[in-house]
Structure formats: structure tokens, C-alpha cells
Image (cartoon, rainbow, N blue to C red):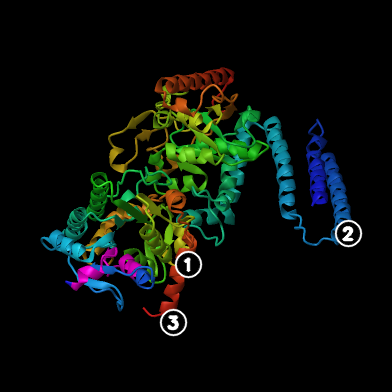
Amino acid sequence: MPKKKTSRKKTIALTGTAGFVGSSLLREIENDPQYENVIALDYRKPPFELRKTKFYRFDLTETLADSKLLEIFEKENVDTVVHTAFPVSPPHDLGWAHEIVSIGTMYLLDACAAKKVGKLIMASTTEVYGAHASNPNFLSEDHPTRGGFKSRFLRDKIDAENQFLRFTKKHPHTVVTLLRPCTILGPHVRNYKTNFLQRPILFTAMGYDPLFQFIHEEDVIRAFKMAIEKDYPGIFNIVGDGLLPLSKALHLAGKISVPVPAPVLYPVIQTLWYLNIISAPSSRLDFLKYLSVADGEKAKKIMGFVPRYSTKEALLSFIGAQRLREAHLLEA
Amino acid sequence: MTKETGTLHYLNKGETETPPVTPPTPSPYDELIGQVKNRLDQIEKEFRDKFKRLESQEKVKKTSPPLDISSLVQLLEERIQKVTDEIVSKNFQKNKGQMKIVFDGLQKMRQLINGTEFKSFLSSLWFGRKEENGEIDPFGMDPAFIKRVKPFFDFLYYNYWRVSVEGLPHIPSEGRGLIVANHSGTLPYDGAMIGAAIVNDHHSRRDVRFLVEDFVYHFPFLGTLMYRIGGVRACPENAERLLAKNHLVTVFPEGVKGIGKHYKNRYRLQRFGRGGFVKLALKTNAPIIPTAVIGAEEIHPILLKSTLLARPFGIPYIPVTPTLPLLGIFGFIPLPSKWTIIFGEPIHFGPTYGPKDAEDQLLVNRLSETVRGKIQEMIVEALRNRRSVWFG
């Protein structure tokens, strides 16, 4: 084993490197000379050529994934694990989502506990707070996560978060950071929310106009890098400054919004979701009705994370790229 | 720079002198208008002279920032508007019957509805905001929207409920303050009217934020309307944040129990929650301004209510009022009672109790009960002086 001699240095392991956050973060780390040993774990290859990163084809949902993971961690002497292997868009196959989100996290944490890694970073989302009429205007990190009432998918995500929090209690020597970015927008990001914003005509819930916050993709990646570079244990909301009412956001994007009474909208959306015509189930409609805005003060104070793009700028950046793409001036 | 501020001060003085010009007898209005016009000419001349002198000096140092003239114009406009509003409302009350005011108001309303303002108001509710550059505050209050709906709230304030206000000097011109009031009226008009009273009649014209029960946010349009005109969902986190930013905040500690009480229980204050407002005042060291709202109980008298039928809609109750299910959508039109808003003397917990005492639940309950007693007293006093529900 010549490997063992050379690689006593600390290694960063990234999971979910085919996803948006994972791949963008990996690209960033690849280009940064201060990181030498990086491994990427996913069952699909990252969408670009790797130079220094070692890629392991690995499925978190397979049986005994934990001991296989531990083997890799031991071999590479992994010290920092960034866990981004979460589907962002709500999947149709909720069973698979449960396997990867809930069970995958369990396997990963088992391996991390056995390897005694120094740092664990998890990518979550502010969606875990849920959209409720009873939300305070700014949700702080210690607010209960109530996003799982209607959505099993979000329930799994909250379960993964809770596993991380339990891990923190059991293993106080490991630095556990949970980052909750809000809706990510930018020139490159693709998920169900950008799909929503790409349609020319949008259905909205009549009479509801909640405030939205967005964060630019660059800011999110920067926040993750900050968490890798320094130790910030705890949960942090990663959000852009400023708020936009949904109507104004759609107006800025040049969309035609069609207000439909909410009780009618729910079954319609659910049917369209089952028919695979739209990319989110009706449980996400709550986010078009009620407030779900997170407070980014803690990240500002403790991490010193100041977003470079405001909510409006993030949206405009997304729209700008969209228009260029429509004119075939930007690669898809 | 010093010269500039000097002129500004002088101008301010000149403007504050305009209101006393109003003669004691309101009959010769033309004379008054002439006088004010003369005074305005004078001000204009003075302004021009001073500015010229200033400019001639200022040629040496061109780096100084220009005088913000537009704000000056706004100030002048606002002040004169206030005086004329007062004169007009006084004139209404003296010369015409109160029903006449309502009918005049309805006339005005009809004109408003026919005008473009109403259409843009409806479209903004329906399709959302159209302005490109309107900024909102972190809680969603939208000054451009308020400007648009103000005529309607002013109609309610001046013509429909003919709100008379007492104890305005008790409102602080700046800094935080917690207005604690009795809650009534099925829909939270009272919060909007307290806000209108301060914006229309208090010299600082400051914005008032009011806390709204969460059930409002379940309704389409209503929740959106509320946050745009300055309503904020009632919860300790929001209130603390607002007070920390030195806002004036209206709270209704009775909550749903107060706003949806039976008509037979009118003007009987319900339990003041769990004393959350006292904790807030203690934590943020904000003065409490006890406030009584008279007249809001009669706008939608609740004869019956059903909590069971309301459950599927996520609202606390479905009311039965003399108009509500009977007249369909028109049942939502409130009755034109005569309102009085009384601001009481501010209560400072200040030096005696500090933020630490917010943990002492016994003390909190006791203080809460004191405030409640004070407001109940004010209400009883006001009701004793009231002769009629409709004419005050």
C-alpha cells in the first residue's frame, strides 16, 4: 500500500458531487491550490473533468454502505466530510428519496463516527422550517422545523438534520455545521424552483403574495468554503439580504401570473404532479401562500458571512442568464 | 454647510408660524386663505433671498451637497394639508349633521371608485405590484401601496367612523413605544385606525406597526393587505425585532378572544393573554401607552359564532352578525358607528423593573393586570360620556 505513506495529510470528502451544490463546491475546491487531497463520492460522475480529485463511484443507498464508506475514509484519511447528497427537487419516488436522505445520512454518520472525523458539514435548506401562517417574519436557527407536516420528502430531510444534531451531542469533538441556504438562484442552478420560474405563465394562489428571499449560487458556495476553512459549529441560515414579494419577483422576471383560488389550485397541481407535467407536488404550494423567511443574522455575526448579492440581484442574475440562454448566447 | 442649516431653521420657523395665522372665527375663509397666501409669498421671497446670498458665498466651495429642496416642499405640503384637514373636519362637525358626513364621504368614495386610483388599488391586490422601484421594509410594509390605499382609510377615518382622538401628546415623537389597546370589531380595523390617528393627527406623523393574529394570514387578500399596510404577525420574535428598531407598535393583548367576543360582552376586556406584552416592554424598556378604542365593538356585532364550522378553514370562528351571512359579501361592510380613540398616559416600567424581571411570571401577570385595569377604566369613563353609538 504505497498510498498510506503519502496521504497522511487531511483529506476532504464530498458526497453528492453530481448535484448542484456538490459539483459547484468541488469545482471551487479543485481550482483552489490549498486543498490537495480531495475525494468525491457519488453514483454519477461530476459534470466536469477532474484533475486532483479522486472519484469513488459510491451509492449511499446500497447495503453495508457504512462499512464500505469507512474503508474509503480510512484509506484516504478523511478529516472533513461535506454531505450534499440530497435531492433538491421533490422526487416522485419517495421511497428512493427516503433511502438516500434518511438512510444514506445514517450510513454516512456511522462511518464518520467510526473514523472520528474532525468536521462534518451538511447542506440543508430553509424549506425545513415550512411555510405556515404562524411563522414569525424572520425564522431564526433555533425555530422548530415544521416543514414536514405535508411533505414526506421534507420530513426525511428534517430527519437527516436531526441525525446530525444527535451526532453533535454524541461526538462533541467533531465540528458539525449545518448550513440552510434559502432558494438558490444564479446563472447555473437548475431545480424545481428554477423550472417554476422558467415558464412564461405561472399559476399563483389568488390573494396570497408572500415575501421571498433568494441567495446567489456564488454566495452559497462561498459559505460552504468558509465552513470548510474555519470551524463554525452549529446551524446557520444562509440567505440573501432584502425581500421581494412574489408578485414583484414575477414582475421582474417578466412572467404572466394567473391567480387561481388556492382550494382549486391544490388538486390541480397534485394531478399535474402525478402526470409528471410539473416539477413539484401540491404540498409546495404553501410556499406560495405563507411566509417562510429565514434570518441570516447568525451567519453574519459568527461566520462573518455577508452575501455579495441581495435577493433582487440574485433574481436578476438568474433572469439575465435565462434571457441569454433563450437567445442562444449562453450554453445551456 | 452652517449657512444652509441656518436657512432651513429659519424656514422651519416660518412654517410653524403659518398655523397660528388661522383666525379664531372660521367663517371668513377667503380672508384666511389670502393671509396664508401672503405669508407664503413672504416665505418664498425670504427663501429666494437667503438662497441667493448663500449661493454667492458658496461659489468658493463647490463641494458642499445641494439643499434637499424636495423634502422641504413635502414638509410644507404636509403641514398645510394637516391644517386644512383639521379645518375641514371641524367645519363638518359644526355645520353638518354626522349622517351628512357619512353621505358626503360615500359621495367622495363613489368618485374615488370611479377614478383610476381604485382600479390600480384593485389590480395591485389582484395581480401584485406594478411599480418597478418601490422598496418594501423587512416586514413587507410598502409605502407606495400605503399611499394608494390611504384615501380609503382616510374615508373610514374621517367620514365613516368619524374618529375623534384624545391624548395624542402621550404618543412619543420618536423612539420605541408599545400601544396597548382593547381589541374588537371581528376584523382588525382598530389597528389600522390607531395607525391612521397617529399618521393623520400626531405631529410626528410616524408610522405605526400593529400586530395581527395569525388567522388573518389564512385568508386570501386579507393577509397580504395587512402586511403591506404595516401589520405584522403577532409573535414575540416579531414584536421584539420591531421595538429594537425603535418602532411604535400596537398590540392587542386580548387577541382573538377580544376581537371575536359576543356583542353582549362588548367593552368587557378579556384576559390579557399571558402577559407577553409586559415581557416585551420589560425586555426592550419600551413605554406602554394604554389605549381605549370606543365604537369598534359596534361595527360587526357578533350575535352568534361557530368554532366548529370554522375549523376546516383554519380560522378561529365564523361570526353571525346582523349583516354577515344575510347579505352575503355585502355583510362584510362594517356599520358606521362613531369612534373615539383615547391614548392614556404612558406607563414606564423603566427604572423600577428591568429586563431580568421578564422571567418573573407573577410580577408580569400583576403588571399586565394593572395595565388592563387602566384601559378598562378609560373605556368605562369614555362610555359614560358617550350618548349615542352612531353619533358619539
Q: Position of residue B117 (x, y in %)?
A: 58, 54
Question: Tag 2, which chain?
Answer: B
Q: Are marks 2 and 1 on the same chain?
A: no
Q: Which residues are magenta?
A: A2-26
Neighbor class of circle 3 (other Cα within 10 Å; few <14, some 14-19, many 20+) is: few
**Label ID, residue A329:** 3
Which residue type does callout 2 highlight?
Answer: Ser
Give the structural element (helix, strand or loop) at label 3: loop
State the residue in front, A69 or A269: A69
**Label ID, residue A316:** 1
Q: Is residue B133 above or below residue B147?
A: below
Asked if the stretch drawn in magenta spans residue A16, the answer is: yes
Is A106 left, or right, of B268 in this rendering? left
Which residue type does callout 1 highlight?
Answer: Leu
Per the model, the C-alpha gap separating discs 1 and 3 is 17 Å
Per the model, the C-alpha gap separating discs 3 and 2 is 55 Å
Question: Tag 1, which chain?
Answer: A
Task: List the single residue furthest toward the bottom.
Answer: A328
Q: Are marks 3 and 2 on the same chain?
A: no
